[in-house]
Amino acid sequence: MDRRIYVLGVILLLCFGLLFFQLNNWQVRQANALQSKSEALRPPVDEFEEPRGDIVSSDGVVLAQSTPTTDGYGELRTYPLGALTEDVTGYYDVTQSAATGLEAEYNRYLVVHQSQSNNLQDLLTQHNGTDTVVTTLSVRLQEVAAAALAGRNGAVVAIDPQNGDVLALYGNPTFNPNTLSSHDASAVAKDFTALQDLKDPSKSPLINAATQQTYPPGSTMKVVTTSAMFDHDPQLTLKTWPVLSSTKLPDTKSVLHNFDSEKCGGNLAKILALSCDTAYALIGVKLGARTLSDEATAFGFNKVPPLDLPSGEVDAATFPAFSQLSGNPPYYAYSAIGQFDVTETALQDALVAAGIADNGVIMAPHLLSRVVDDDGALVYAYKPHKWLTATSDTTASQVRTLMLGVVQDGTASAVGFPARLDVAAKTGTAETGATGCSATWLIATAPAGPYDVPSIAVAAVLPQTAGGCSETGAEVAGPVVRQVLDAALENNG
């Protein structure tokens, strides 16, 4: 009897062992092969006819959603805020099987897919569903930015410098993405053609004005040049620069003039506050090609910022390479004041301000906050991380203090920033080279007092096309930045 029980026990143990082995064989060793066979047997699914998850703002507003239809397509993708958030959401075109923006970047979460399993209960109750992509975008700040631009071409970007959250990202020209998500193929094709600018593709609404459109940054580049002085040649920060209205550039007959031929000079605080081109041109010559190029690179020029939009929808700022500058002192002078071949996007200039705000560190900019499933459970949470160390914390603090002077006693003093916000800023008025007109800029961060931790960095750019091309960054871009900063920090003080 005992022997029979023993034999039976051994047989049962062997059976359990074989069962355990086969389960592991299926679930681990052959999992991919079995999954492939399953998918091969399953009829093909057109994801453009499937429901999609929502895209929502940080303040809970739906930016993109799907609703069932009876027109032969499964779902209609709609954008409740239309053009206001197109730069972020992009569009989802079922008639051409195309997508842009966050619709493309986080498609894997938005399409119907098998729910994530975090425990045994999830494994036993798995189902197919869509996730919701929660962004860092504040619809309130986005509305303020759009209203401040008031239909004018240009762009505004606002970032939390401490974590890289993109709080606002808006540009003109723009368009209503609902026109390209329609199920009327002929209407979509017609609208898409109308949105293209064949004479100048850079002016098409299909180009993201905040992340792809570039302009010479003008005097906002002096923030980077000033940082280069502290980082590479601190003795220059102690010099007093001659009071001039113009200066002859070395190795050339060319003369560089101050804006409106104004006379300026003095110590570093004075020349940055007054945005003195002659002084900074001389500084550029003193710093030289290698230093200027290295500092620009440290701040992210010639690199594509890692914003979570599809490849091709974010462009790099450009600064001349050392080989291009080397041996050409006039180029040093113009590059130091954001002219020559220097260009950047509103996103990049906001990142420059963010680096000064966050003690020299530029956090990776991002639009994703988190992903939740259709039951509200967390699927993924974005983890903020550093992109670049642009400069030292000591340099960033010194430059930030100098930028406070730009608001208190310099070119941004007439913008009207509330004193309670302790705004550090820099204006910019740049020659575009095409028409002799200017692109007007202003970058700012706040609160930037001695004991403050800045919580927002903003950049605004508006190209000039008329009016004698005489307007300044303070006059044009200044009020735009002021409104966004004031809205973001309205509870301060």
Image (cartoon, helix red, strand yellow):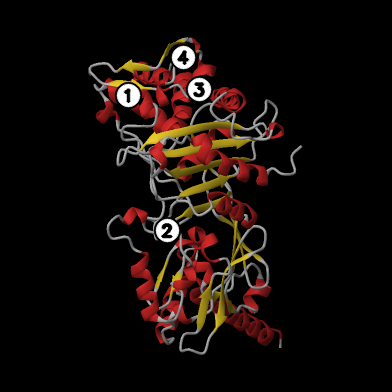
Q: Is residue 40 above or below residue 384?
A: below
Choose the circle earlier in sequence order: 3 or 2: 3
Q: Is residue 9 above or below residue 109?
A: below
Between 333 and 483, the one lying in front of the other is 483
Residue 41, quarter of picture: bottom left
Q: Is residue 94 above or below residue 100?
A: below
Which element type, helix, strand or loop, lies under badge 1? Answer: helix
Quadrant containing the N terminus in the rendered view: bottom right
Between 317 and 409, the one lying in front of the other is 409
What residue did someone put label 1 on?
Answer: 332
Q: Tell me where residue 377 appears, x and y as whole percent.
A: 67, 67
Choose the circle earlier in sequence order: 4 or 1: 4
State the separation of the CA atoms marked 3 and 1.
18 Å
Choose the circle earlier in sequence order: 4 or 3: 4
Q: Nearer the viewer, mark 4 or mark 1?
A: 4
Q: Residue 265, which numbered label?
A: 4
Q: Amino acid at mark 1?
A: Tyr
Q: Residue 310, which numbered label?
A: 2
